[in-house]
Amino acid sequence: MKNIYSAIKVTDNVCWVGAIDWTIRDFHGYTTPHGSTYNAYLVMADDITLIDTVKAPFKDEMLSRIKSVVDPSKIKYIISNHSEMDHSGCLPEIIDTLKPKKVFASTIGVKTLKELFHDRHEIIPVKDGETLSLGNMELTFMETRMIHWPNSMFTYLAKDQLLFSQDAFGMHLATLERFDDEISAGTLEFEAATYYANIVLPYSPIVLKVLDKVAASGWKIKIIAPDHGPLWRKNIGRIIELYKKWASQRSVAKAVVVYATMWHSTEKMASAISESLAQAGVKVKLLSMNEFHRSEVVYEVLDAGALIVGSSTLNNNILPQMADVMTYLKGLKPANLIGAAFGSYGWSGEAVRDLEAMLREMKVDIVATAVSVRNVPNEGALQLCNELGKTIAAELKKKAASN
Ligand code: FEO
């Protein structure tokens, strides 16, 4: 039977043999409205090597793409750059099917794969800086622990000046276009930023160190081949520059106002705060958790300098939509933020106090007095919201100017 799927040529020696997931809409809490790809690559060296595999249900699609260029039994080595199951889910079955001579992962990757699959396959550890000869070409490994799992590593193919970067520089975007120059710059930057904010953000200090490590390695890089989304061959300088910007999390004059409301009182307060921020010349994003998703919030927070959060009080608590986004944000560790809290209540009013405590836990610098209003805000209460916005704007501009 003829193959349904085909490999896509990346260079004379490398093919993309991954899978496209058009329908995935949730990636452990990160909404992925545009699907994703699980990228795997074949290095057609003397010793044919498969770099990463795909999520378990996509094994046959990957095998079909491999078969379009080579008999899969001719694959001698498999490299696992990252153990998370979207890249290793079919690895045990693929090892059984292909029977490669050797399978390699980082030292922590070996342990992680054992703990994930509890199977009998031997995985050989490779160290940071170690090389593997494929006969007529050579691979070099670089540990990139915590970008974004402890097992993560990069693999570099010097002959093609190609960096296999696993999740780094990736994006969740299902597309038949495989290269950055086939996709609009706006889409690339939006999807890469969304991916960074939702996956890589907590590890920003490590990202800066790894970027330095790659620069110091002397590797010339003509292509970056990540494990999700398009390969970078035209805009490599731009995506590295963006990673440096996102990882450094410098304060800018942008505020994100996030709230949830029961009967529109907290919403009126959010609107008054946003209006005064905008009047003071600050860029504002107003996001109601009654409508927006946590992934959209963290995308906006990525390049913001202020986070202002509001909630009605429900049963002595913040609203559940705010608990959701605050938990998510706390885990993603956005840095260098100032902020404040606000909200309305009927009789007890714990929400504002609790939100302030959560901001402090996130190391957000509280620079304005919280506004807490019983029932519907009157003109005076909305003036207080205006003042809160003005205070934040003044602090934000001062901070942004000192960067
Ligand atoms: Fe794409 Fe961390 O897995």
Image (spheres, helix red, strand yellow):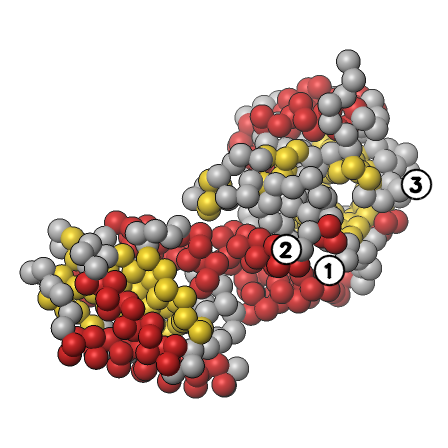
Q: Residue at x 26, y 81 (%)?
A: 387
Q: Which residue is mark 1?
A: 235
The one of 17 and 274 positioned closer to us in this rendering: 274
Q: From where the camera sits, is residue 357 visible?
A: no
- Percent of width and height locating residue 330: 38, 58
Amino acid type of disc 2? Answer: Leu
Q: Which residue is mark 2?
A: 188
Check whether the beta carbons of the residues at disc 2 and disc 1 lie within 8 A of each other.
yes
Mark 1 or 3: in front is: 1
Look at the numbered disc 1 and say if its residue's Cβ is closer than 8 Å to ligand 1: no
Left or right: residue 47 compared with residue 112: right
Earlier in the chain: of badge 2 and badge 1, it is 2
Mark 1 neighbour class, 10 Å CA radius: few under 14, some 14 to 19, many 20 or more: some
Earlier in the chain: of badge 1 and badge 3, it is 3
Using the image, tell me which numbered label, if any, was put on residue 136.
3
Q: Residue at x 29, y 60 (%)?
A: 259
Mark 2 or 3: in front is: 2
Amino acid type of disc 1? Answer: Asn
Q: Residue at x 44, y 52 (%)?
A: 295
- Percent of width and height locating residue 3: 76, 21
Look at the numbered disc 3 and say if its residue's Cβ is closer than 8 Å to ligand 1: no
